[in-house]
Amino acid sequence: MTRKERWQRLLDLLVERGGLEVEAAAASLGVSAATIRRDLDQLAEQQLLVRTRGGAVPHGVSYELPLRYRTSRRAAEKHRISEAVAALIAPGEVIGLTGGTTTTEVARALAARPDLATGSPALTVVTNALNIAGELVIRPQFKIVLSGGVARPQSYELTGPLAQQTLGQLTLDTAVLGVDAFDPEDGAATRHEDEAAVNSLLCARARRVVVAADSTKLGVRAFARICATSRVHTLVTDTGVSAALAAAFEGAGVEVVGV
């Protein structure tokens, strides 16, 4: 296991357990306690956790890993979801992509589609995510529209009045949402109200809304609502979604695609 892989696993365990003890982490990863102590010290220097006597804890209730440390979590599921979402997009559409690991994979899947290799433009992509814009801007067949706003270091998303002002002037065919939670009764949501405000506007400006979310985000709630369930046309998720939960979404008028 490389140091990068070990750090990723430690951060995943920290999120799952809400705290780490050196001996338990060493046993989980199959390395020495001394190695874990060094790793935790280095992660603390990067302000990714807080060191405690004998272990580490997150920064607080609102703790959230930076995007670069979340990309490998449920990677196989996210890859399948992104391919399925990309297949829903027709050439020539104007699409909106929110920030997040799954929507970043959707952007990559769109860039890899042979039928979108040419066109003027093959797609128009509207996004408030700096990393997505950076990956797609090198594709001359894609027209990239990036909102203004204030950048969030954790997610690379632009938020605030400038972003809302820009997006409020545009019309989209399809908005693809990455979410922290999606519940049949409470709708789609995220942890941060500033992200929710921008994502909500993308939904309002789109004729079709697609939620791309792995099954761990379904049937749960988050702090800031993006939109009501009735506003979502399609949910693309993995096969881990239960039959009862899928039926609840379908009963609320959402097409459920499990991949």
Image: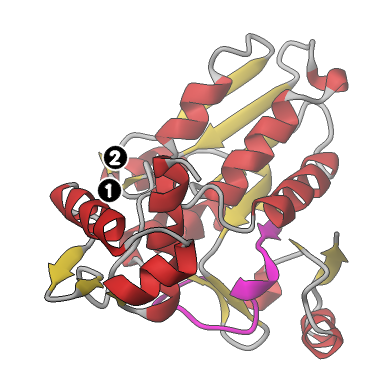
Determine whether 116 is above or below 248 in the image.
above
Q: What scheme was used to colour the molecule?
A: secondary structure
Instruction: Answer yes or no: is residue 238 visible.
Output: yes
- Give the residue displayed 38% in from the left and 48% down from the top: 155
Amino acid type of the residue that numbered disc 1 sits on in the rendered structure: Pro
Residue 55 pos. (x, y %) = 22, 72
Tag 2, which secondary structure? Answer: loop
The residue stretch that appears in magenta: 210-228
Mark 2 crowdedness (10 Å alpha carbons): few <14, some 14-19, many ≥20: some
Front position in the image: 150 or 33: 33
The amino acid marked with disc number 2 is Gly
Taking the image as shown, residue 154 lies to the left or right of residue 51, namely: right
- Vertical relation: 164 (above or below) 92: below
Residue beneath disc 1:
161
Q: Quadrant of the C terminus?
A: bottom right
Looking at the rendered structure, the number of numbered marks drawn on it comes to 2
Instruction: Tell me the CA gap for discs 2 and 1.
Output: 7 Å
Q: Which mark is residue 149?
A: 2
Q: Is residue 205 visible?
A: no
**Residue 205 in the image: above or below residue 179:** above
